[in-house]
Each structure stands twice: as C-alpha cells, then as structure tokens.
Amino acid sequence: MEKFEVIVVGAGLAGLSAAYALAREGVEAVVIERGDYPGAKNVTGGRLYTRPLQNFLPELWRETPFERPVTNEIITLLSPDKSVTLRFRSEEFARLPAHSHTVLRGTLDRWLAKKAEEKGAMLVTKNRVDDLLKKDGKVVGVLAAGEELGADVVIVCDGALSLMAEKAGLRSPGSPRDYAVGFKEIIELPSQTIDDRFGLKPEEGVANLFLGDLTKGRFGGGFLYTNRSSLSLGLVIRIKDLAEGNPPKEAPLFLDEFKERPEIAPLIAGGETVEYSAHLISEAGYAGLIRPFADGLLVAGDAAGFSLNVGLTVRGMEFAIASGVIAAQAVKQAREKKDFSATSLSVYQNMLADSFVLKDLKTFQHAPDFLDNPRLFQHYPQMAGDLLQNLFTVGPEPRQKFSTAVWEKVTWTETWEILKDLQKGLKI
Ligand SMILES: Cc1cc2nc3c(=O)[nH]c(=O)nc-3n(C[C@H](O)[C@H](O)[C@H](O)COP(=O)(O)OP(=O)(O)OC[C@H]3O[C@@H](n4cnc5c(N)ncnc54)[C@H](O)[C@@H]3O)c2cc1C
C-alpha cells in the first residue's frame, strides 16, 4: 500500500489551506478531490472576511485573486409589493487592506491549489474518497477509486455533509433543521455597467443581503455580491422549511422569482448567467460542532461544522482556511512526537479554542435560536414596508400625526412580541 504522511480529503479552502501549510513545513501531503479541479464543486455566496486571517498564511493575502473590496453594506427587507433598503458606506472599509472582499471560488480555489503545489503538496483531482481505512480502531488511510492509500493522519475537509466524519463516527446524519440549501448564479456584466448600476468607483464593491418575501416566510435570505465583471446572486432556504412549506414549491423557483423582483431585475438586465450552482450550508452554529479529532484523523472547515450565520454576516470561508492551517500545525506537533493518536491530535481542539474559530462560534451560539423565528422572514419586512408607506403618503384627507400612524401599526400586543424577539436578539 502506497503511504503518505498526510492525506487531505477535499480540495476546498479548508483542504487546500491545510495542504499549503503542511507543505510549507516540509510535510508530505496529498489532497484528493472528487471534482474536475479545485473550485469546481465549491459554492459560496461570495464574501471573505480577511482581517481574521491576518495571522493565517499572511504571505498569501497580498496576492490573492480577490474580486472587489466590500465598501458598501446593504440590507434589504422585502414584502410582496414593497422594499426597505439600508445602505451603509464606510471610508474605513474603503481603506486597504479592506476588511472583506468578494471572491469567486472557481478562481480562488484554483489559485490556492497552485500555491500549495508550488510548496510541494500533491493534488489528485477527479478521484473520490469512498472510505476510511482503519486498523485497531485507528484511521490509517483512505480508499479512493478502489485503491488503498495509507497515511499517518487523514485530514477530512469534505464539506458540510462530511461523509468521512460520519464514517469516523464523529457525526451523525444531519437534521433538516440544521441545514439550508443555497442556489446561486454568477451573472456576467461589464465592470463599468456594475459601477454605474451600483454607484461604485472601480475599486469598490457591494454586499447586499435580502430578507423577507423572497423565501415566502421560510427561514433564509438572499444575497447579491459585486465581483469585478460579474454579480453573484442567490438565496438560501432551510431544508426543514422547504420540506414543510405550504404550498410546496420547487426550490430553484425561489431564485427565478427573486430575479424578477423590481429590486433585482434592473441590476442584472442584459447579464449572462455563466454559472449555476447549489450547495448545502450548516445553520446549526456552535450547537452543530463535532469533536474534530480521532486516532489518525482531523476534521476541518464545513466538515467540522465551522460556519456561522448571524443574519448580518455569513461566515464559513475564513473558518475553513484557519481550521485547515491549525490542523496542519497540530499534525506538525504530533509528527515531532511521532504520536498520531487522538490524545496527541487533541491539541487541534485546544488551538481552535484559542483562535477566532471557536471563540466567534461560541460568542454567537444563540444566533440560530434568534433566527429560528418566522416573524423575521415575513412579519417584520412587511411591517417595515407598510409603516414607511404610511409615513411617506400624503393623501386627499388631512394627515394624521406620525406617532398615530406608528401606534396603529405597533400596537401593545405587537410591542410585546417585538420585545420578546428583541430579548432573544440581545443574547447575540
Ligand atoms: C449559498 C452559500 C453561500 C455562502 N456564503 C458565504 C459567504 O458569503 N461567506 C463565507 O465566508 N461563507 C459562505 N458560505 C459558506 C462557505 O462557502 C463554506 O463555509 C466554505 O466553502 C467551506 O469550505 P470547505 O473547504 O470546508 O468545504 P467545501 O468548499 O465544500 O469543500 C469540500 C471539498 O471536498 C470535496 N469532496 C467532498 N467529498 C469528497 C470525497 N468523498 N472525496 C474527495 N473529495 C470530496 C468537494 O468536492 C469539495 O471540493 C456560503 C455557503 C453557501 C452554500
């Protein structure tokens, strides 16, 4: 049986970061990816927060093929016939290095794979890992394309549904409550057209999140990110809500309808859809974390549950990169001791706990509870639209006071419900 020091399963950002960091330290690493090339099967909305990554692969961030820095944050609440938009622009966000950038995975993952290969990592594409090899309960390699390959450590980075972590006995099959499915199109447009439509200078970008009628009251939301010469447009809906939705509706139809909204249609007019993708995303947050180590095995990125949706921010990519690097550091320590047992590899858990990965997931552990509230996805967007319509309307009759208009909408019962929701929100 051919044997390597480390086998990494999956060439997403977690797997490639682990491979890069291992190869940089002179550790033999082979990455096995089922897709035709890194990035082929990877989906993200499109924004990477780079500041948390300053201490992870710092030599790379200056030459990374980012799309645009995000200088404008936009939140849009949609009701069936109205929308309310809040646009935030910040000079600080416009200063380099920017706090976050839009990215395209087809470009980013291929670039990172090249960097890892230049450091000496091996990449095998179009090969699926089908199983873990175990000896006396310890993981000793993988079965890929009918071939047995040995390793001191296997780093599992196979994404949100991680079959390998399941095979290692570290996670059980996910519940529809804990996962959402995302649909996304990349729509090409000339960069000048994007600048004009979004009111941007060439080195500026927009991240627009949407909440409300686009998911028809179901848990989820939409996103639109400006790239250099394309837009990433998509939406995410929790699987449980898709399954239980009444009336039932085929998931891709939500994106079709979203594209027809008057808030979206003019922004994408004349654009060509060059990529369509769908992917799962974990919504469980801290409660969905697994033990990310076993004898001869580490788990990083989405496979370990490292993703966090707090409504205003959606994060997974920088957790994937950081956990991949930390996994490599843990392997290096275990290698120095020549001990790849679970006890030795448990240093990974401690290092994660000291990093922003577990700290941020813990800080926002109540976010999934707060978001598990249908009022956020229908009632509040509707109420905001109705209230503003009332305040902006001057009709034939004499006007009522603004405060009277507000109290008509925000009754005592309503105030009580808002306070209850706020109380949950204040735990975040
Ligand atoms: C719609 C959507 C929007 C999102 N928006 C954002 C955002 O704006 N910002 C953000 O930070 N995060 C976002 N996320 C989350 C982010 O994309 C993920 O957290 C990130 O991609 C995780 O990287 P990863 O390397 O862990 O997993 P992945 O990128 O999923 O990589 C896993 C890799 O493993 C491979 N693989 C799987 N099984 C096998 C096997 N058996 N053998 C070989 N290879 C295998 C896959 O082909 C894939 O290449 C979003 C996710 C979705 C779905």
Image: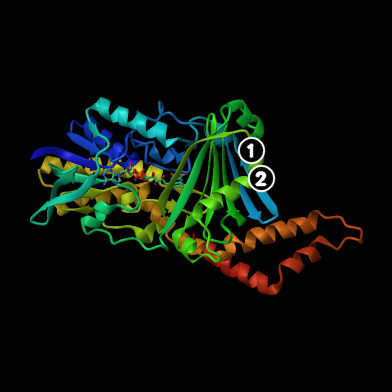
Rendered view: 416 above or below 333: below
Q: Amino acid at mark 2?
A: Glu
Which quadrant of the figure has residue 409? Answer: bottom right
Looking at the rendering, which quadrant does residue 394 occupy? Answer: bottom right
- Could you say which is closer to the camera, residue 341 or residue 226? 226
User: Identity of the amino acid at label 1?
Assistant: Leu
User: In this figure, which residue is indicated by the disc labeled 2?
Assistant: 263
Residue at 64% across / 54% down in the picture? Answer: 78
- Residue 41 appears at what percent x and percent y? 37, 41
Q: Quadrant of ligand 1?
A: top left
Residue 351 lies, in percent from the top left, at: 27, 48
Judge whether residue 427 can be spotted in this image: no
* Residue 132 seen anywhere in this rendered image of the structure: yes
Residue carrying label 1:
267
Q: 255 or 68, which is in the foreground? A: 255
Residue 360 lies, in percent from the top left, at 41, 52
Residue 132 placement, left or right of 179: left
* Coordinates of residue 106 in the picture (x, y in percent): 40, 34
Residue that lies at the very extreme toward the bottom in this rendered image: 413
Horizontally, is 22 left or right of 46 in the view?
left
Which of the 4 quarters of the picture holds residue 406? bottom right
Q: Secondary structure at mark 2?
A: loop
Toward the viewer: 189 or 250? 250
Number of disc labels? 2
Quarter of the figure with the N terminus: top left
**Label pair 1/2, CB-CB below 8 angstroms:** yes
Question: What residue sits 41% from the left and 62% below the top?
Answer: 176
